[in-house]
Amino acid sequence: MKRFAGTALVLGVLGLVAAFVLWWLPADDFLFVPDRAKPLEDKVEVETQRTAAAGDVLYVDLFVRRIRLLEQLLPFTRPEGATLQPEEAVAPAGESDAERRLQNAADMRRSEEIAAVVALRELGYDVVATPRGVLVTTVFGDVPASEVLDPGDVIVAVGGAPVRTTTELRARLADVRPGADVELTVRRNGKPVPVTVRTIADPDDASRAVVGILIDQDARIELPFEVDIDLGRVGGPSAGLPFALEIARQLGRDVTKGCSIAATGALTLDGTVAPIGGVKQKTIGARRAGVDYFLVPAGENAEDAQENAGGLEIIPVESFQQALQRLATDVEKC
């Protein structure tokens, strides 16, 4: 009996050690984990003094981390609301964690600039945003472009013809057949670099040629006064919409009607609200913060938010201008 008890004790200790090791050892894939929505009032500073409207605008982030081996083997050990994401979806083309953090930081800085342009322009301020080319934000790892293009490149010409805007780039590629080579000129580290990119067929339209990248507008931006946004280590482009709403609120626009309004969505220079990732986790984070309304990009993002709303009122929007309109007409005063 004593020998059996001793063996059981040893096995129990070994099991605990194994569980501890499995808990701390990371695997290759990632987890998206909900984080609670937070107010932006102390994170956004607008130089021009105004009486800010009542209410709160909140941004929603999520934790992105490597899954631990124990969580991979035993899904019930994962945090509530977490979603498993394959490595290639989070870090394309073998991108390291350090490179991913740098890219997220660059996306955040661009998101802050664009939010200021969109908000101030909508409020009638004189804003300069001169297009300078098409910024490559992401290159998918399984496409030929991954061998010659890098995030941060700015496409300035196609076949020798200048390109300044995303619309011009799409127009230049409209007559290209899938599989054909395209001559691009990109601005890299301030210098023009010629590259040849082989196109692929659009997964949703086999007759349409695409490069296999995500893009945004690069522009020279001049604001009439300083707008400072600091979220610390938070990265990525998905806080553009709440940034713009908070800037408008601080400049006296009653965007909240005294309510707590959470929002998520990337902004483009024309005010379009672009889809983002991690909507399930962000909806849970907004719900946990007890907000009154949650603005999300229309379409699939809004559908995902509705599935996880749990009674939280979801407002789908396609643009910043529409967001202001929906807040004015669909939100009851709190």
Image (cartoon, grey):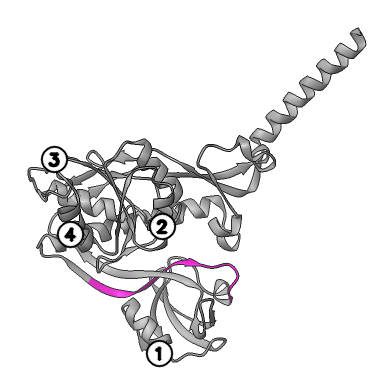
Specify the amino acid type for callout 2.
Glu
Q: Nearer the viewer, mark 3 or mark 1?
A: 3
Q: Which residue is mark 3?
A: 54
Q: Which residue is mark 2?
A: 303
Question: Is residue 61 visible to the viewer in this orientation of the structure?
Answer: no
Residue bearing mark 1 = 160
Element assignment for label 1: loop
Which residue corresponds to mark 4? 325
Q: Which residues are magenta?
A: 130-143
Q: Which residue reaches farthest front?
A: 311
Q: Residues within 10 Å of mark 3 (few under 14, many from 20)?
A: some
Q: 10 Å neighbourhood of mark 4: few (<14), some, or many (≥20)?
A: some
Which residue is drawn at the image coordinates 57% and 58% (left, top)? 95
- Which numbered disc, 1 or 2, marks the residue closer to the eye? 2
- Residue type pointed to by label 4: Gln
Q: CA distance from mark 1 to mark 2?
A: 42 Å
Q: Residues within 10 Å of mark 1 (few under 14, many from 20)?
A: few
